[in-house]
Image (cartoon, rainbow, N blue to C red):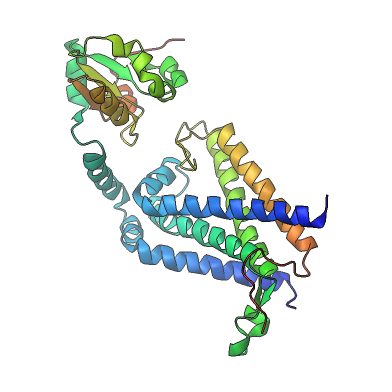
Amino acid sequence: MIRVTWRRELTLAVGLLGLAVILGLSFHWSLVQTAFRGNLTALLDQKRQERREVQFQGVKTLDLAQAYQTWQEQRALFVDARKAEEYQELHVQGAVNVPPETWAELSSSELIKMDRARELVVYCSQESCDDALKLAKKLREAGFSRVMAFVGGFRAWDEAGYPADTSR
Amino acid sequence: MSASVMRLISSVVGLSLGGLFVYAGIQKHLAPYEFAEAILAYQLLPSGLVGLTAAVFPWLELTTGALLIIGFLMKAEARFASGFGLPGLIAWNGVLTRRSSLLLIMLQLGLFILVLLITMARGLKIDCGCGLFTDRQVGPGAILEDALLLGAAGWLYWREGKAESGEEGLLIPVQSK
């Protein structure tokens, strides 16, 4: 019978750690290398874009300037896809909140009762969040033909100093 | 409670814990760029190290989870290395396998909790990148989930220490040479 000692336990644990490092480096060497070279953000932006083109195919997007122009022209209803507490703290002026936890019952929401030809601009927290695209896709599937996702999110809007409201 | 019932409970807990780690590791391994984004959002590591962490962490979860499962399926003892004349160093048995993988699992969970606490204290409202089945923000829920898993791993580690003398695994009858 083998005696279980601290030395053996740690040896196996360290060996396992080494195995994880070898496997991780072998499978994702390009990611590790790019990060060490300081190009991680550009790589992540590119990969995010590629993934979204497949996952959210057909969903139209707006950049900050286009979103602001749409807001100024009062053409569209802005839809905030963030959690209720984030919306209450600060949101795009005039936006309505459709938080993720209500998406399962989207068919019974007030938004769905609106004219399906109404232009909608959906946004979430920031560039890296997918919630705006997810909700925009759901709304398209629900019959809204003029729905767009503002991918910069509330962070970009706020940093640009554009009009925002609080519900507190 | 009888020893056999306790044995069954610890096996179920151990196999579930191992399964969760394997599942979490596979999820992250299949989406390395999303995992790197989640790590970057914590703003704790220089971006040069984010790539390394995103590459290695999923495999650490995967290997420790898989080894924990193997440990619970193994019989007490198997001297795989004895044929190579290295029995003292690499001799391997179920208890050793379980305790080593549990040690690493506890280390990972402790690290997760520490990072979550630091992030909460800094007031960052970000996705934790740790939700097993759903997206979830850094907050008490994520900490509680990890604390429960840490409690389970700690209990198993303690139990394996108590029963060090070679309880048998569930399924695979590995004979010692």
Task: Give the vertical position of B99 relative to B134 (above or below).
Answer: below
Q: How many marks overall?
A: 0
Q: Position of residue A106 (x, y in %)?
A: 36, 19
Q: Is residue A57 above or below residue A158?
A: below
Q: Position of residue A126 (x, y in %)?
A: 33, 31
Q: Quadrant of residue A26?
A: bottom left
Q: Nearer the viewer, residue A160 or B15?
A: B15
- When the figure is inspected, residue A6 is found, relative to residue A2, above or below; the finding is above
Residue at figure coordinates x 73%, y 71% from the top left: A4
Q: In this rendering, would B164 be left or right of B102?
A: right
Question: Which residue lies most toward the right here?
Answer: B1
Q: Residue at x 17, y 20 (%)?
A: A146
Residue A99 appearing in the image: no
Quadrant in the rendering for residue B105 = bottom right
At 62% across and 49% down in the image, what residue appears?
Answer: B110
Report the quarter where the C terminus of chain B lies: bottom right
Q: Position of residue B112 (x, y in %)?
A: 56, 46
Residue B45, image x, y percentages: 45, 49
Looking at the image, which is closer to me, A42 or A110?
A110
Query: In front here: B150 or B164?
Result: B164
Left or right: residue A168 versus residue A125 is right
Would residue B132 be visible to someone looking at this image? yes
